Amino acid sequence: MAVFGFQQVDVFSTEPLKGNPLAVVIGADGLTDVQMAAFANWTNLSETTFLLAPTSPEADYRVRIFTPETELPFAGHPTLGTCHVWLAAGGMPKADEVVQECDIGLVRIRRDSGRLAFAAPPLRRSGAVEPEVLARIALGLGVAPEAIVASQRIENGPPWIGVMLRSRAEVLALTPDFAALSGLIIGVVAPWDPSREGRDAQFEVRAFIPGSAVTEDPVTGSLNAGIAQWLIGAGIAPPSYIASQGTTLGRAGRVHVDQIGADIWIAGAVVTCVEGTVRL
């Protein structure tokens, strides 16, 4: 048994307990795959990450990302949360941007007005959603097929399918049938009405992951990255906007999206909630 540095942080919120929690084990190179998977299963958070020495000469650090059930090649809130912990532990980037190594490749991260932002990785799969899959999604969400006004495959590691509804109220009212959605992971988005809902955000997002320990993710960086690439690319969203997520779970997540040149950056605040050591 060895002792490792440990932090639990809250991502996409300036206020503790209002974002998406992440457990981070520091200096985890000595852990086996089995130990990492077991600890992630024990934390029972949507993701747990392990900070490792990089294998790429371009990277500042390497990260492995685990859900309670499996390992992910990439995820958004673990990217920002792990970078926050690496910097807090004294990490010094080789250049202006931090470069994270993970299974999807190298991910660039920049510090932006008190927030961290990652450059959305290229989509592994995009394009139209098959009609039979879309019909199954409508059934599982409990909405009429015509309530889905747009849809897109937005796979960037996790195999997200994005669907758009007409209003924030429709998104917040969803009570999915997770059995009907088994095998799919769904991101739902709709615009805010500024006249009724204010200008704190421009879109509402929910993330549904049937069959997982966390069936609704509080605030999801990878999903918001895919949604941004889809909506901005289609001219549905402006080059800069804020997405709200986690409302129905009592959270107040805010995801800041900015297109700068060819890159789409996904930004959020990170706050440390727990700091200490873990014995594994």
Image (tube, rainbow, N blue to C red):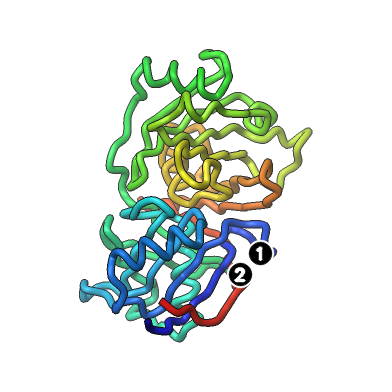
The residue sitting at 43% across, 36% down in the picture is 185
| Mark 2 closeness class: few <14, some 14–19, many ≥20 residues within 10 Å | many
The residue sitting at 62% across, 57% down in the picture is 19
- Label for residue 14? 1
**Residue type at mark 2?**
Val
Q: Give the Cα distance between marks 2 and 1.
A: 6 Å
Rendered location of residue 237, percent (x, y): 52, 37
Seen in the picture, residue 60 relative to 214 is either above or below; the reply is below
Q: Secondary structure at mark 1?
A: loop
Q: Is residue 95 left or right of residue 115?
A: left
Whether residue 24 is visible here, answered yes or no, is yes
The number of numbered badges drawn on the structure is 2
Q: Is residue 272 left or right of residue 279?
A: right
The residue sitting at 33% across, 80% down in the picture is 94
According to the picture, the residue beneath numbered tag 2 turns out to be: 271
**Residue type at mark 1?**
Thr
Seen in the picture, residue 135 relative to 117 is either above or below; the reply is above
Residue 160: name its quadrant: top left
Q: Looking at the rendering, in which quadrant would you find the N terminus?
A: bottom left
Whether residue 231 is visible here, answered yes or no, is no
Rendered location of residue 153, percent (x, y): 37, 32
Comparing 96 with 182, the one in front is 182
Q: Secondary structure at mark 2?
A: strand
The residue sitting at 41% across, 83% down in the picture is 91
Q: Looking at the rendering, in which quadrant would you find the C terminus?
A: bottom left
Mark 2 and 1 residues: CB-CB less than 8 Å, in contact? yes
